[in-house]
Amino acid sequence: MADKSLVMTFLNEEGTKANITLPGVKDNVSQQEVSVVMDTIIAGNIFSSTGGDLITKHSAQVTEKNVTDLVVR
């Protein structure tokens, strides 16, 4: 089973990177959708980091983790 997450990276007021990870991202998420979400997060000023408010977009990526469940008794 593969688990996909969206990792959005922002720069904060100190100029350091801060990540927000959203698990369970859909397979066909577009760059435009991600960009709009990131703009909304910045405009709404709803998250803060140890380096201050998030002020600009840096990057985004979809990561995939493969998980194999094992049966143990």
Image (cartoon, grey):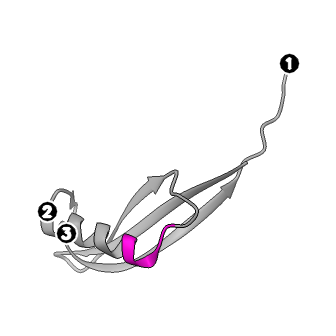
Residue under label 2, please give it: 45
Circle on res. 42: 3
Q: Earlier in the sequence, mark 2 or mark 1?
A: 2
Residue 5 drawn at (x, y percent):
52, 58
Q: Residue at x 55, y 67 (%)?
A: 28
Residue 8 drawn at (x, y percent):
39, 68
Q: Nearer the viewer, residue 37 or 14?
A: 37
Query: For the residue labelled by badge 1, is the local secondary structure a helix, a strand or a loop?
Result: loop
Q: Nearer the viewer, residue 42 or 37?
A: 37
Answer whether residue 31 is magenta in the image.
yes
Disc 1 or disc 3, which is closer to the eye? 3
Q: Nearer the viewer, residue 45 or 40?
A: 40
Type of amino acid under label 1:
Arg
CA distance for labels 2 and 1 = 48 Å
CA distance for labels 1 and 3 = 48 Å
Q: Quadrant of the C terminus?
A: top right
Type of amino acid under label 2:
Asn
Q: Is residue 19 left or right of residue 16?
A: right
